[in-house]
Image: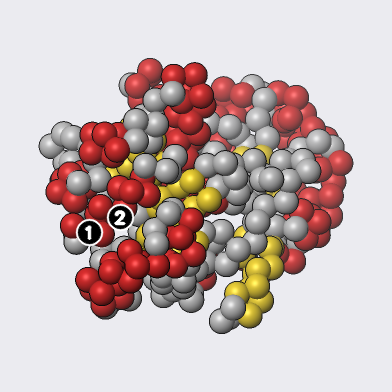
């Protein structure tokens, strides 16, 4: 039995933030039912990329798939019949849409008081922007991430991954688990919700509190760390390295490893505060010394001295790294149409538990199987099919 096998999750989500939340549950064994509209009423490619592409296969794995038309009264009735036996419903409609469909918390908890409804939106469930469509890059801009990303003077830069989507999904998964834990004591479900904007501001972490506590507006620092010096990218005789060190003890180790004891006597860089003020001088001294040897040798020497240092990889190099291979982060999965594909396994490990390796379902692949499990007879399912509700 996998850790979350006792929970049934009805997944109404699309694109990335919602599916990311649900995947956290599916990857640890939750009985996740992915609900999509029948193909007859959803003739487009859908949101979230091509079904057989890397993106879609990554975010929807370990689920079973059914089709159901929530806009049809019989389809909605069938969904609520499933809600009566489920534990969690996850949706990322705009706030007004779920109320219009009749899948809001009041409607669902009337069917099952133990249900946990998790909602993800662009800007929150209420407020002046509640009805706006949400998109990761918009949240990156409004949440402050783009303003601190990139080289000084370059102008705002989008991060290379959908940080707002992913963090909203992760925060929502945490909220679901909290609600399920509380339900063990109260017997009642909860409505939990997160937005891309809230998640992005939350992920700004110390950069946000530099403003809220100190009134300081963080700026772009490029590859330098905004507060920890020296930290950044440096050239060596044959390539780049990533060096991170802060505090007097780490500075002492860097000086000894580089052999720059004389330069380090400069009174302008004698303390943390002075090195922060004179970052350019510190970086120049380090850069000159690093050109005397190769990236591989410096990485080895710094790590032996207890100074964090590493290479800068492209994605192919990431999965060729011996530590990444040792951790088995590349996870083979057998897909009935695509054959063996390789996905990325969950990054956390639970000793003694092997995550499931179920491929992303085809649209409606498990409709009959799932409806039987929820107590629908063959005649009832046939009637739903005839009406176009599934």
Q: Position of residue 84 (x, y in %)?
A: 37, 42
The front one of 268 and 170 is 170
Drawn side of residue 223 relative to residue 77, left or right = right
Drawn side of residue 269 relative to residue 199, left or right = right
The front one of 117 and 57 is 117
Counting every numbered tag in the picture gives: 2
Residue at 34% x, 35% y is: 112
Q: Is residue 250 visible?
A: yes
Residue at 52% x, 42% y is: 7
Q: Mark 2 highlights which residue?
A: 78
The front one of 246 and 169 is 169
Q: Is residue 389 above or below residue 113?
A: below
Residue at 64% x, 41% y is: 3
Residue contact at pointers 2 and 1, CB within 8 angstroms: yes
Q: Mark 1 highlights which residue?
A: 74
Drawn side of residue 259 relative to residue 308, left or right = right
Q: Position of residue 341 (x, y in %)?
A: 63, 74
Q: Position of residue 373 (x, y in %)?
A: 48, 56
Q: Residues within 10 Å of mark 2 (few under 14, many from 20)?
A: many
């Amino acid at each position: 039995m996998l850790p979350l096998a006792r929970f049934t999750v009805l997944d109404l989500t699309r694109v990335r933030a919602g599916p990311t939340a649900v995947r956290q549950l599916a990857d640890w064994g939750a009985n996740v039912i992915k609900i999509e509209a029948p193909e007859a009423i959803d003739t487009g490619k859908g949101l979230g990329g091509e079904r057989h592409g890397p993106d879609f296969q990554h975010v929807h794995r370990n689920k079973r798939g059914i089709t159901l038309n929530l806009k049809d009264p019989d389809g909605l009735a069938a969904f609520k019949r499933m809600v009566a036996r489920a534990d969690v419903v996850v949706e990322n409609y705009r706030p007004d849409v779920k109320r219009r469909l009749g899948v809001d918390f009041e409607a669902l908890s009337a069917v099952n008081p133990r249900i946990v409804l998790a909602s993800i939106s662009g800007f929150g469930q209420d407020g002046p922007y509640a009805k706006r469509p949400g998109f990761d890059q918009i949240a990156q801009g409004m949440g402050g991430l783009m303003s601190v990303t990139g080289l000084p003077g370059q102008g705002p830069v989008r991060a290379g991954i959908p940080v707002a989507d992913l963090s909203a999904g992760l925060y929502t998964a945490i909220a679901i688990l909290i609600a399920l834990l509380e339900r063990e004591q109260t017997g009642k479900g909860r409505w939990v919700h997160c937005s891309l904007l809230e998640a992005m501001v939350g992920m700004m972490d110390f950069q946000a509190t530099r403003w809220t506590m100190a009134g300081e507006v963080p700026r772009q620092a490029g590859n330098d760390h905004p507060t920890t010096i020296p930290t950044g990218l440096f050239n060596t005789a044959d390539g780049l390295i990533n060096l991170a060190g802060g505090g007097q003890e780490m500075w002492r180790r860097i000086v000894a490893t580089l052999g720059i004891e004389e330069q380090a006597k400069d009174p302008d860089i004698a303390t943390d505060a002075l090195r922060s003020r004179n970052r350019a001088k510190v970086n120049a001294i380090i850069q000159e010394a690093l050109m005397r040897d190769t990236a591989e040798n410096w990485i080895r020497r710094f790590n032996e001295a207890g100074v964090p240092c590493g290479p800068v990889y492209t994605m192919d190099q990431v999965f060729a790294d011996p530590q990444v291979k040792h951790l088995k982060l590349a996870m083979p999965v057998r897909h009935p149409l695509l054959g063996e594909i390789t996905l990325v396994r969950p990054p956390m490990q639970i000793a003694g538990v092997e995550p499931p390796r179920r491929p992303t379902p085809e649209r409606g692949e498990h409709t009959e199987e799932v409806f039987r499990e929820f107590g629908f007879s063959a005649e009832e399912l046939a009637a739903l099919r005839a009406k176009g509700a599934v």
